[in-house]
Image: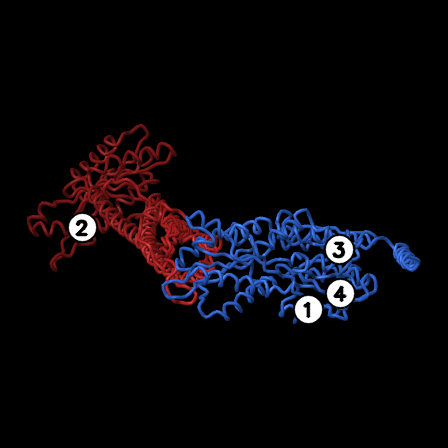
Amino acid sequence: MRSFSWVRCLVLAWAVVLAGSAHAVSVVFINPGKSDEIYWVTAAQAMAAAARSLGLELEVQYAQRDPLRMLALARALVARPQAQRPDYVVFSNDSATGAELLRLFDGSGIRCFMAFSGFTAAEEQQWGKPRQHFKQWIGSLEPLAEKAGYITGKALIQAGRTAHAQAADGKLHLLAIGGDRSTISSVRRNQGLRRALAEANDVVLDQMVYAGWSRERAAEKSAWLYDRYPAARLLWAGNDLIALGAMQTLEQRGGQPGKSMWFSGINTSAEAMQALKSGRLAALAGGHFMAGAWALVMLYDYHHGHDFADEGVQLERPMFVLFTPAMAEKFEARFGQGYDSVDFRRYSKVLNQVTNRYSFEFAPLLR
Amino acid sequence: MPNLPFRSLAGHLIRNTLALALCCMVGVFGVQSALMVQQHRAEFQRLVDDIAKTSVPLLAVSLWDIEPRTVQQQLNLVAERPQVGYVLLLTGTGRQFEAGNARLGRQTDSRRISIPTPQGTGNLAELQLWGNPDFEVREIVHAAWTVLAGYGFFTVLVCSLIASMLRRELQKPLQRLARFASELTPQTLVQPLVLDRPPRARTDEIDQVAEGFSTLQNGLRAHIADLDRMVAERTQQLEALAEANHLLSITDPLTGCLNRRTLEPRLLEEIERAQRYQRPFSVICLDLDHFKRINDRYGHAGGDAVLCATVEHLRRATRSRLDWMVRLGGEEFLLVQPETVLATALRNAERLRELLETTPVLFEEQQIAITASFGVAQWQPDQGPSDLLHQADALLYQAKTAGRNQVCPADRRLVAI
């Protein structure tokens, strides 16, 4: 009992020292998505929960999928008076805006952290790694997007095999609608699909197109694809919205997702979870929406003197899980009202001296 | 020249030039339009080839990637070209895109371009292109205006230049020439032609006409001068003839003495002068003695020779400038001696009588002795010519009666009277 109160006193004293040093640590998240876009809203909610958990001050600004707006938001932050500028800014290298954002923040005193999507190999070639060319760019954290593509692809092929959806040539014909051509997470997911395809010699990829993460465009493009490839029975989607759009088109044409065609998606929107449970969606992977929240954990540790550089300044972690209907049920039960049930303090190295490696896997959260 | 209405040569030339220019303009425009139509067809074909090279690969990729907005944008870009009227794209799966004016798409034939897949394994769609006839018309109209404006400006410029040159070089000098010619009279023939032209290095047709005019003037002038000279000559000849005629009318053709007709007016003049100046004058009337016998003996030729010799003697013996002589008829003569009183006249008569008596006439190598009788009288105031003649004649008769070869009166007293 005595020793316990002594530890508590130590923690309190340390907290006082921190509070005395300055105000609460402030972080701005430049959200590349739309303020009604389920994935990015979920990501922001998870970050907000993490910030509350860790005692950080978080401000989320939506770029509404407009690259120019991302730059405008960055300029507005830099234009703030010194005292009102955040300590950290978190952003994603969507639409290849990362380098320009780093350039804008360079010399502003705001430290940068790239989450969700980092530099491509070519961009890294040109701009270098964190803390090299841009000194205030302290690091990046990316989900292993390749895995999401791989596990959904593999599950989708398996669903096709199970349903005996082979065409007249005895092969499974697969259509793919990716997110976009440039964002690294999109590229990696596509690579994952290709790995799954390479492992399955009974599957033919008829064509891959890109729908810009949009449900409407996916609906439109899938119509073309259904006309162009009447033999295709499998459709792999870069995210849940694309899958939902393509399914909607199929239903309009008289088809039945899960019965005449099989779909896979990525992300954890309620609609996607519902589709998985109803059997319309054959495969769904998710969990990487937590990347922002995990980034806050890393920033918390960095700010409190425990630099993540010992693990690397560019971290890639497997954050995806392939959902089963049961897991979907559990996910909804656990996170339907938000993410405050997660104790993010458990992942901090500062707060947990024993932890020597960040583990940002999603599956343990569903146990 | 028939009486036709006037038409300016310069105006006629300008009108004809303008008409010719207009014809040429229409011709040039026609040829150009035909060429332009051909050129437009060739250009449209080139454009179709260009589109096949540039837009079709992009369309192929956009179609393959299922980017309908990009496809539509590409079609819009193609249709934006002014030569293109309407574009229609039909995909293999029955989808249709169009851009431009659909109305044009139904009118003419189209150019068709197949759009292959990016892998070249088959056809994704077919692109159909229709030309824009409005653009062609617009281009031709634009070209027409350019040609019309350029050609019109050039024509006006050239015609103005020609008009100005014609007026200065032809019209004005010719009008001046015409006015000069119409105003020319025999009196002003020598007046030189002044055209008032600016100085030039060379001569021209106008100068030739002017020179011709000058030559004509000189010829006319010379001709008129020649006529004057001939007229003067003829006049002189006529005057000489008239003079001779006059002489003939007042003289005796045989002896050259004044004839009887002249006597009375001359005598009257003499009387008037004597009256006016209170001067005396006398007359001597003489008649050859026995002249009939001479005629009979020597013939009329002999008689004539005697008469001529007598007159010659008398003329030589009297004052040639003052005295004058009249043949009164036959062998009778009257000698009028102005400024002479009777006594002097008597002396003169006596001298003449002696002269004739002593000087025989030589005729055909024979000497014909002659004598004459004289009647001498001095004019008395208020005596008329006939009175004076009568008196002298009476005195001559007295001398004849008294025996011939004598002067009557012989009495000196009469001289005193």
Report how far apart the C-alphas of labels 3 and 2 lie in the structure: 196 Å
Whether tag 2 and tag 4 are in contact, CB under 8 A, the answer is no
Q: Which residue is disc 4 drawn over?
A: A138
Question: Residue B217 at what x, y percent from top left?
Answer: 33, 52
- Residue A127 tag number: 1
Protein chain holding label 4:
A
Instruction: Point out the frontmost of discs 2 and 1.
Output: 1
Within 10 Å of the Cα at label 4, are there few (<14), some (14-19), or many (20+) other Cα atoms?
A: many
Rendered colour, chain A: blue
Q: Is residue A282 visible?
A: yes
On the rendered image, what quadrant is the N terminus of chain B found in?
top left
Describe residue B35's horizontal placement relative to residue A343 as left or right: left
Question: Residue A86 at what x, y percent from top left?
Answer: 79, 54
Within 10 Å of the Cα at label 1, are there few (<14), some (14-19), or many (20+) other Cα atoms?
A: some
Whether tag 4 and tag 3 are in contact, CB under 8 A, the answer is no
Q: Is residue B194 visible?
A: no
Q: Which residue is disc 2 drawn over?
A: B308
Same chain for mark 4 and mark 3? The answer is yes
